[in-house]
Image: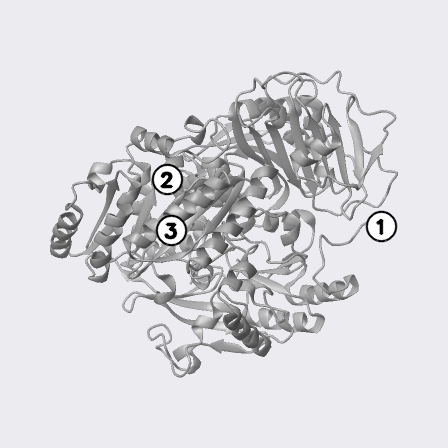
Amino acid sequence: MEVDRRTLMKGALAGGALLALGVPARTFAASPPSSLKSCLLFLGGTLVDDAFERGASAACAEAGGAELRRMKLQGGLCAHPDHMLALLEASRDVRWISVMDDADAAIFQELARTTGVRLLSRGSHSCTEDGARSLRHVWLSASASHSAGELLAARLHAEPDGFSITERFLEPPANDDSLEMVSLPGFASYRSAGPERLDMHCSGITLAEACAFVGWPTSGVWSPVVLTSPKGSADTPHPESWVEAVGHAVTAAALGTGQVARSTSGHAFVRGSFGSAPIRPAGRFVSFVMDR
Amino acid sequence: MAEKYLALPKGVSEKSFDAALNEFRGVLGEASVLTSAQDLAPYIKTMMPVPDSEHTPSAAILATTVEQIQKIVAICNKYKVPIWTISTGKNLGYGSAAPAERGQVVLDLKRMNRILEVDADLCYALVEPGVSYQQLYDYIQERKLPLWLSVPAPSAIAGPTGNTLDRGVGYTPYGEHFLNACGMEVVLADGQVLRTAMGSLPKSNTWQVFKWGYGPYLDGIFTQSNYGIVTKFGFWLQPAPPVYKPFQVKFPDEADIVEIVETIRPLRLGGVIPNSVVIAHALYEAALKAKRSDYVPGPGAIPDEAVRRLANDHDMGIWNVYAALYGTAEQVEVNWKIVTAAFGNSGKAKFVTEEEAGDDPQFGYRAALMRGGMDLREFALYNWRGGGGSLWFAPVSQARGSETLKQMALAKQILAKHGLDYTGEFIVGMRDMHHILDMLYDRTNPEQVKAAYACFDELITRFAAEGYGSYRTNTAFMDKVADTFGPVQRSINRTLKKALDPNGILAPGKSGIHLE
């Protein structure tokens, strides 16, 4: 006989582990999938929550005022996986934008898979003290249409410090060379000719160094691409912090702004630091965008 | 035109795969056959130092009945499509839910989740593979049954079938999970359904009470293997004891591991301490209380001096022993005197009882696991280094102090060489110890990924050279570990594979078992 866990878990939700914030759900202002009714910003109770939320709110404002429902986890997901599972199971037609630490992210991903989510992107974001180019973002995205990498690159480009952004797309690339390659002013662009079609954009650093930094093949297969009009970032507002920039990029991608088809399996933006050591605060977190 | 699928099974054309998927849809329904990137993404991400692309599935299919699974294997045989079966799929640090090889179809049994029977008198349960520990725990609590589970660290989100079939362990007196397994039902590659041991008799009521059955004991060949798909799983539950007394013993130096093990072994063999004791190094639990960056500013392994400082700052032992006593008040009182006297000989042990621990999270989660409770706080480990990289290295040692010291020293040396920390613990059986070491690294940093791969490879190689085999490993290193057990074992495994699965459709590569 099956236990009615939904009843049990819904009772547990009232226990205070989750805090609902913000205004009721609104539909996207941009081009949401027609089946989705609302967007939820789920904050994992980390030190980056506030900054991420600021960036997310800015993205919503730019997308015509779409408002996010917000929910904040208290006490850590590891302490209340059953509450999290109940919340996911009860969720219908919602696009989740989530931010949490590595431990909670590992559990969250497992719980999400249990409930049959559609994972659009998972990003790992860090600013460590290990080296000069220590701001690192690594994404696995379902497809290029959910890409947040170039949105983030555009915002970070306004800052003097170095960064690396790597994004892989699970969907095979469209076999259409007429599709636009997007880059930024000041970046040299290359495309790999191997079985995987990868785009590398680097600035203040050689191609070989950039490839080594992100762990991509360095030898032989890259061809330079001259872009006649790379998208500018001159008018992009300076984010208050790198976390805010990530919050903005992830949310903008989730809301469907800036979606462009790509003929690539992945791309990277690597910029060397123009200053000395970065002055950003250290930190590390994981972002998710998924539909449930 | 873009490719249609994220990946194709090895040796299967797109046309054949189209046909196989259509037949899967005919059996399971459209919604239970997943091929889109968004639907498969949750199955792809692992924590291993290899590209995700090496473990990308071609599809995921969700089955809920034995009959469906029989039809699925028939389709797989027809089109030579390999399937990788997961139950709850929470094999964190061992490959997660991703298949062993690119292009395999994940057969996800999470929805096959009926609790078929729980007998409170004979203390056993019979479940389907998708049942989680949390689900079973809730079932027991709701009915106020006097039964305890034994759970691994992923407790709430993992399941008894998957954990036991991979020969995982827990922390209660029933912590040797496969020892307490009793009877299973298996769908074979040819579609036959086997009920092992006493389950083969149609009217049997001893399927879950007597392990051995008649003739060769077949249950074992379905663990850590690819010889069949388990669709029902029986196992024993611990009767809830009247008294449960968890405790912690802290030791200040790494060399104390010798004394610890020599003290514990007779207590375990003599039944004084009945549960699988854990001897955790300070770094294993450090993330619960500390940030690595506060003790190690740059790259490289954490120095011993910093570990001592961390342990001191947070009132941790360098070794932290967790054990418990179970029984009547009289039994516990007698055994407590024995335990405290045994550990008290050197004067180095510092005892902490549940009352003294208060709300210490380090004690709290261990106490929960030792009573079969649901607690995931061990996974604070993943915040120690960050970056999502984790591989469990799991060699076995004798329950002998000199051996554990030797293994720890060897592991530390290899890890430090690659810039990684020793985050290890020993789980004490009777005569053996599982030396569980979480190799934590930043998976977003290519240098650390390279170091992690090289380190894990070296750990396997050098430990095997000393005669220490791994009891379990992740999907990226299964062949390497299989090699350490020599060609005869591999040959026998292959022979069984050819006999039971001549088309090689079931989890090719699991534990290094291939057709050729």
Above or below, A84 relative to A159? below
Q: Residue B115's x, y, as percent?
A: 42, 63
The residue labelled by disc 3 is B407
- Nearer the observer, A266 or B259: B259
Q: Mark 2 packing: few (<14 Cα in 10 Å), some, or many (20+)?
A: many
Asked if residue B429 lies left or right of residue B343, the reply is: right
Q: Sequence order check: which comes first, mark 1 or mark 3?
A: 1
Q: Secondary structure at mark 2?
A: helix
Residue under the point 31% across and 59% down: B429
Judged from this view, the residue extending furthest toward the front is B465
Mark sitting earlier along the chain (3/2): 2
Q: Amino acid at mark 1?
A: Met
Badge 3 element: helix
**Residue under circle 1?**
B1
Which of the numbered marks, if any, corresponds to residue B285?
Answer: 2
Q: Chain of mark 3?
A: B
Percent across and percent down for residue B247 are: 23, 45
Dot 2: chain letter: B
Question: Are labels 1 and 3 on one chain?
Answer: yes
